[in-house]
Amino acid sequence: MNEFTTCISSTLDPYVPSTENPWNVERVRHAFRRIGYDANKFTVTNALSLTPGQLIDQLIDESLYTPHWPEPAWANFTIDDYANLGLNFDDQTQANHREVMLEVMRQMQTTGLKGRMILFWSNHFVTRLEDYYTSNHLYEYYKTLEDNVLGNFQEFVREIGITSAMLIFLNGYENTNNSPNENYARELYELFTLGVDNGYTETDIVETSRALTGYNHRQNWTYPIYYNDSTFDANDKTIFNQTGNWNYDDVINILFQEKAPLIAEFICKKLYAYFVSATVNEAVVSEMATLFVQDFNIANLLRTLFKSEHFFDAKTIGTQIKSPYDMTMSYLKITNFSLLQDHYEGMIWFNNLLGQQMFEPIDVAGWQMDRDWINSSTLTGRWQILQWTIWHTWNNFNEELRTFAIESSDHSNDPYFVTKSIIDRFMPLELFSEEDYQAATDVFKHNLPENYYTDGIWNLQYQSVPYQVVLLLLHLIKIPEFQLK
């Protein structure tokens, strides 16, 4: 993860605006872009009236206290329930899956951080929807994520491990007193809490797998998995040098008693890479871990990180590559363009094509993110998907393109200023040179005679403006900086 030396040398001390490091639109948008999925101009302008600390508290609190998604009618349905209602199991299941994914997208668009953290933790506590498939298992998994995304990490680990989705994906369902399966015990340490070969032995894995037995019972493959003593290994086990007749809860307690500093370091490094930089500052991660180990409260840890001079350091801005959902959701949030309902489902499909299929990470270790999102295939795919989205607005909500230009430029009649104001809403930093802005302006000016601009014939009420905005958007999505956040 850390093959380069970081150049971000600031600390976790609170960010205090100064002449050298002002509280400005660039930093406000950095906060919205990294913590959520960017923001429209009105939201950014309002945020400038807050202090950095007030903005961070607002962004975290709205995710902490927003109401949970109401339990859908099908949350506990099994194949028998669908049959009794005369519904096609496969068709209804696929519809239910889309409903969950659309809810995550709604969280991305409204509370920002909550939606982002649901996606983050689903890429940490990895399961694979195609393995367990049923809607009730997906809802249980989703609800566990939603309940815990900013809560206590120890309790999060405890709850996620006995969801049916996890028990199926990591073979916990097959782990019995007569036929042990070590897969979940291994991943509990290697992927979820400690990291590869960090603080545990093969003996710890074997003994832990024995303590995790008993979760092997269900009526049929669509019913929830439950615990029963009949398949539990009731003999003594030795885990991290502690011996006793340990069960699942004991494993989690012993793990956090004995390995808390290692757990904190591992999770903080992952959060740092996700929110700040793939090139990890070990000193800052160590500071984060010292804080995290005190109570394992995720929200408190993120408050400290997001309020820090390190997070708002100029060298953190525009240094990460957008994930597919970063790209599509931020585009929608910045523009605030209307979408037909079926286009939201299309967005799910588009992001699947770009390599980010919700609840289906690439492997048990999850997506590695950042540079792994971009290659020759996915880059052209990104262009094509946004081109389709831009033309969708042109065909269905034409005048919103004009409104976007007016809002961005505050009714300016200067084509260069209009162009720059639109570009700067999408880019984390200004473009490299004035020539880049001028080239974009030439695209925006289209083929209208130059005297239309110099003599005041043209303004943002001119009939061609919506199409001119389309041309500019098609141009700016191919600017390299557009892929950064």
Image (cartoon, rainbow, N blue to C red):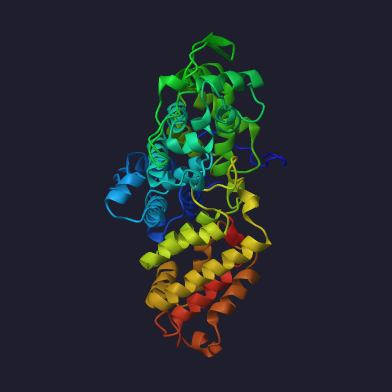
Q: Considering depth in this image, is 279 or 180 the residue closer to the camera? A: 180
Q: Residue 441, relative to residue 383: is it above or below?
A: below
Name which residue lies at 63% across and 62% down: 379
Q: Quadrant of the N terminus?
A: top right
Where's residue 365, x and y in %?
Answer: 60, 40
Q: Which quadrant holds residue 179?
A: top right
Where's residue 215, x and y in %?
Answer: 45, 27
Q: Residue 10, relative to residue 381: is it above or below?
A: above
Q: Which quadrant holds residue 313?
A: top right
Residue 69 seen in render: no
Where's residue 207, x and y in %?
Answer: 58, 18
Q: Residue 473, relative to residue 27: is it above or below?
A: below
Left or right, residue 71 beside residue 469: left
Left or right, residue 261 beside residue 102: right
Name which residue lies at 47% across and 31% down: 161
Q: How many marks do you count on the picture?
A: 0
Where's residue 450, x and y in %?
Answer: 55, 88
Q: Residue 247, relative to residue 346: is it above or below?
A: above
Q: Considering depth in this image, is 169 or 192 the residue closer to the camera? A: 169
Residue 180 seen in render: yes
Q: Which quadrant holds residue 160?
A: top left
Q: Considering depth in this image, is 130 or 468 the residue closer to the camera? A: 130
Name which residue lies at 53% across and 88% down: 448
